[in-house]
Each structure stands twice: as C-alpha cells, then as structure tokens.
Amino acid sequence: MSEFGLEINGTLYRGWTEINITRSIEEFASSFRVSYVDQWDDSPAWRINRGDSCTLKWGTQTILTGYVTASHHSISEDSYSLSIDGRSRTADLVDCTAIHGKGRWRNEILFGILKDLCDPYGILVYDNVGNSRKFKRFVLEEGETVHGAIDRAC
C-alpha cells in the first residue's frame, strides 16, 4: 500500500495501512477512507482537517480529487491512529443547488447544458457520444441540485 498517497494542501502523506475507495454511478460522487496506525516516535502528528482539499494518488496517477469530510484521531499509550474520510469534487454537484443565468436553455444540446452546470465547480465534461439532439427547452427546478438537473436532463 506504500504506493498510495494522499496529498492534502500540498503535502503528500504515505504509509496508509488501509484504503477503501467507493465508486458508483448511483452515488455520483466517489468516496474514500484511508487509515494509518503508527507507533509513537519523534514525528509530529499529521494535521488533517475536515474541508481540506485532497488528491488520492497511486504512485503518480491521480485516483480522485476532492475534500476531506472527516478526520478521526485516536491516541493510546504506544500508538497513534488516524482515519480520513473524503469525497470527490463531484460531491459539489450532489450537494449544491444548480445555478446558470436565468436557469433555462433553449435549443441547446445536452453537452452544452452539462458544461454550463459543471463549469462553476471546475468539473470538466466530455462528450464521448456526440449526441447532438437539441432540447427545445430545459429549465432548472427551484432548489434543484446540479446532480438532479443532470440526471433529469440525461
């Protein structure tokens, strides 16, 4: 597991003893949990907090980018343990209300709508299918999440 690293706010942490990654189309946002146990030594405790920006890596390959959602610390006489929970940046699309100008499109293809919805969150959208069918009209519903709008449009 030494190949796995969690970069948080520019610092790369390695040595995780357990790693769980969940990816599911039903969940839309990937999630992860990494755990670390160490015998006490002179090293300072890792300072990782909820909301920190992070990148989960395998060697030099990025697995996901996102945020720390929880940080659990445990200290005993002879060891220190830490587990970090996080979600991918697409969690913003699940948690946040969709915004776009007046909240409506006319004669726009699906790719254009998805791009407009994801751009404010820095999420890139790719069109690998080339579906160019235009929506005569697509309107956001009040309070609708980005994910909800995407799901409805698709």
Image: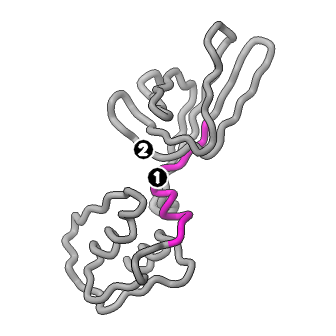
Q: Does residue 143 appear to the left or right of 109 in the view shown?
A: right
Q: Nearer the viewer, residue 86 or 116?
A: 116
Graded by Cα atoms within 10 Å as few (under 14), some (14 to 19) or many (20 or more), the crowding at tag 2 reads many
Q: The disc labelled 2 sits on which kind of residue?
A: Leu
Q: Nearer the viewer, residue 50 or 72?
A: 50
Question: From the image, which quarter does the C terminus lie in?
Answer: bottom left
Which quadrant of the figure has residue 125?
Answer: bottom left
Q: The disc labelled 1 sits on which kind of residue?
A: Arg
Residue 136 location in percent, x, y? Answer: 29, 92
Q: Nearer the viewer, residue 46 or 81?
A: 46
Q: Are marks 2 and 1 in contact (CB under 8 Å)?
A: yes
Residue at 61% from the left image edge and 12% from the top image edge: 43
Residue 71 location in percent, x, y? Answer: 66, 37
Describe the element under mark 1 as helix, strand or loop: loop
- Residue 21, compared with residue 46, is above or below; it is below
Residue at 45% from the left image edge and 31% from the top image edge: 10
In front: label 2 or label 1: 1
Q: Is 132 a magenta residue? A: no
- In the image as oriented, which residue stretches furthest toward the front? 101
Q: Does residue 71 appear to the left or right of 87 in the view shown?
A: right
Q: Does residue 48 appear to the left or right of 116 in the view shown?
A: right
Residues in magenta? 84-97
**Residue under pointer 2:** 64
Q: Is 85 a magenta residue? A: yes
Residue at 40% from the left image edge and 78% from the top image edge: 101
- Residue 143, compared with residue 17, is above or below; it is below
Which quadrant of the figure has residue 41?
Answer: top right
**Residue under pointer 1:** 89
**2 or 1: tag closer to the N-terminus:** 2
